[in-house]
Each structure stands twice: as structure tokens, then as C-alpha cells.
Amino acid sequence: LSMYHQQSQQFFAPGTSTGAGISAVSGPMDAAPQFFSGQHSPSQSTGQLGNVPAIGEYFMYNWVVMDGTNQAVTGVHFDKYEDLLWCVNCGGHLTGYYGPQLSKYVSLHVQKDLRQVCAASPLAEAGVFTMAKSGVACYSKFGQRRWSYSCPGMTVDLAAMIHDPEAGRLTLGGRQDRVLQLDTGTGRLVKCVDMGPDGCEFLRHNGRFICAASAKGTVTLLDRGTGRKEHSLSTVTGQLADVAVQDSLLVTCGWSVRHDGNVIPDRLLQAFDLRVLRPVQPFCVQLDPHFVRFLPAMHDRLLVGNSLGEFQFLQLGQSMPSSPVYQLGVGATDIDISASSRCIAVGDGAGVSTC
């Protein structure tokens, strides 16, 4: 267990929490000088941290091994409403951690092959949603099962899940020809959207659209209110690795097909303006990207990373990276950024969660 902090920093603001991952990092340098309790340890500068793995102004603060006999972490998610970090692994464990100490809040075995987790508002009847290959389940934040849905009469291979608290809908996509929408209170299927044979492996949303992306790089824009198809975009020539959306800007990363037919990682992130449905200037990175995330509290910054544990920051409006490549020294299977952008959670294949 390793924990570090910087002078005059608060890593988690009310409504956010810490993360799970084998190398995790916390706390930009402009944060407020207190933790949850309002107390703060003696000052310590970044120069005193030695060889602690870091991503720019973020540095390793804590780490923990998940329950489930060192199974790979498949999903990490900061609760936007409470100081909790939710993690799932391929062994079927759902674990919630509280506060910067990563104190275990709840842990239970759900089902094998868990792939994603997300949390709902504490005011809603729903609590935490877990997605496996063949279905989803809803639990209270104390671990009590509320409902489950197993896609009756369908052969599914679920890969993506997104929660819309305003509509009370849970949208599911995967390697099947339909996107499913469930009522979050009851788990009842309310809508199916035909996506064609390519399916939908990534789901993101902004204020207007649900962006449903296939592995082949087609991004279909669904009306967030009705679920109706509005537009589609072709984003990569090879295979899509990740999608991020913030306001009207959509950014993708993936692989490109060379002239000889080989597929290689593309170090150009493709970007699109969703207001006019046109590509804009791409972003160049100095690593082979696998993850791309907007920093929620800093709309002009992107974090790009890969499964080797390499990360780099990008500044919107600049075609070249605004930071060098940072190496955590560990692999990454999933990442998430807290709502305050003060903490990054990283999950890895050895079942370790860090922040």
C-alpha cells in the first residue's frame, strides 16, 4: 500500500472518490488543501516523491488488490454522487471502496465475466449496475440485489453500458445487432434499436446524442430522448479502440489499415464536430493509444493511454501533445477519471486497483 500527497491539495471533492487500478495517480496541483475530513498532512513537494509512478501532475496515491484471487480488473468507475469507487473483475467480484484510503465499503461475488460497472444517484431506486457477457444486474449500494436482466430469446455478447439518469434508462450494446434500453427502476426492456451486423462495442453520450460505436469504426448517433437513429460517422479505417465525447466534440482512437493490408496502431486521434457532423483537425500523440478520456472538470484537456501503462495529456486547440509520455510501469485494463478531475483510477490484469 503506497499513499502520497502534495502540498495544498485535495484529491477528492464531494461527489467523487478514489479509484482502482495497479498504478493509480491522484491530484492535480491546483486542488484545495484538504481531504474529506478537512485535515491535511505536512507539506511535501513533488521533488520528494523519488521514483513514484506519475502522470504529469498526478502521482500514485494508493493501491489495493481486489477480492477474487488476483483476477483481472475489467471495470473501474467513480461514483458521481458519493465518495465511492466501484470495481469489477473477470472473476465476478463487485467491490466498492470509500474515500482516499480505499477502505472496503462493500464486496460481493456477482457472476463470472463481469465487464463493466456504473452507479446511479442515491435518490434513485437503482444503485449499482453490473454488466456481464449475457446480462446485467442492479444492486443497492449495500450489496442487495434489486433486479437482473438476461436478454431472453437473444444471443448476446454485451460489451458496453451507459446510464442516463435523466431518462431513467440503461443502454446496453455489444456484439449483437441490437442496442437495448432498460428501465433502471424495474429492469424492464423498453426499447430495442437495430444496429446492423457490426453491433455496438462503445457507448458514450453528450447532452443531445448517445454515441454508439462499432469495432469497425462506425459511430451511430442516437437521439438521447427517443433512441432514434439520427446520423452516422465513419471514424477509422481499421478497428476502433476507444471513443470520448465532450459537448460537441467526438474523439476516437484505434488502428489503421496500411497499403499492404496490415493493421497498425494509429497515432492520430480523429476528431469530429457533432454540430456540423464534420471532421476537424486530428490530434497527434507519441504513443499507441488504447484509451482516450476527457477530463470532466477541464473541458479542454484529454488523457490518452494504452495497455502498457503509457499516458499523455493533450490540450484542445493544439495539434501536438502538451506533455511528454508518462510511464506507470504497469499495464492498464481500464481507467476512469473522477468528476473533479483530481483523481485517476487504473485497473490492471493482476487484479490490482490503484489511485
Image (spheres, rainbow, N blue to C red):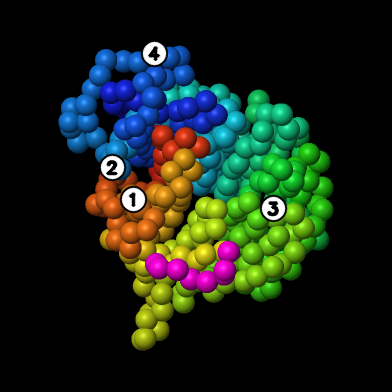
Q: Name the mark on residue 313.
A: 1
Task: Using the numbered discs, state the Cα–Cα distance from disc 4 to disc 3 in whole angstroms.
Answer: 40 Å
> Which one is earlier in the sequence, the residue at label 2 or at label 4?
4
| Residue type marked 2 | Gly
Along the line of sight, the residue nearer the viewer: 219 or 130: 219
> Which one is earlier in the sequence, the residue at label 4 or at label 1?
4
Rendered location of residue 6, percent (x, y): 29, 26
| Residue type marked 4 | Gln
> Which one is earlier in the sequence, the residue at label 2 or at label 3?
2
Relative horizontal placement of residue 234, taking residue 55 as reference (left or right) = right
Residue 280 is a magenta residue: yes
Q: Name the mark on residue 171.
A: 3
Q: Secondary structure at mark 4?
A: loop
Q: Is residue 234 visible?
A: yes
Task: Using the numbered discs, state the Cα–Cα distance from disc 1 to disc 2 in whole angstroms.
Answer: 8 Å
* Residue wearing tag 2: 56
Label 2, residues with CA under 10 Å away: few <14, some 14-19, many ≥20: some
Task: Using the numbered discs, state the Cα–Cα distance from disc 1 to disc 3 in whole angstroms.
Answer: 30 Å
Do the residues bearing badges 4 and 1 touch, measured as CB atoms within 8 Å? no
Q: Secondary structure at mark 1?
A: strand
Do the residues bearing badges 1 and 2 touch, measured as CB atoms within 8 Å? yes
| Residue type marked 3 | Thr
| Residue type marked 1 | Phe
Quarter occupied by the N terminus: top left
Against 336, is 262 above or below? below
Overall secondary structure of the magenta stretch? strand
Name the residue at 45% across, 14% down: 37
Which mark lies nearer to you, 2 or 3? 2
Name the residue at 40% across, 49% down: 301
Region in magenta: 275-282
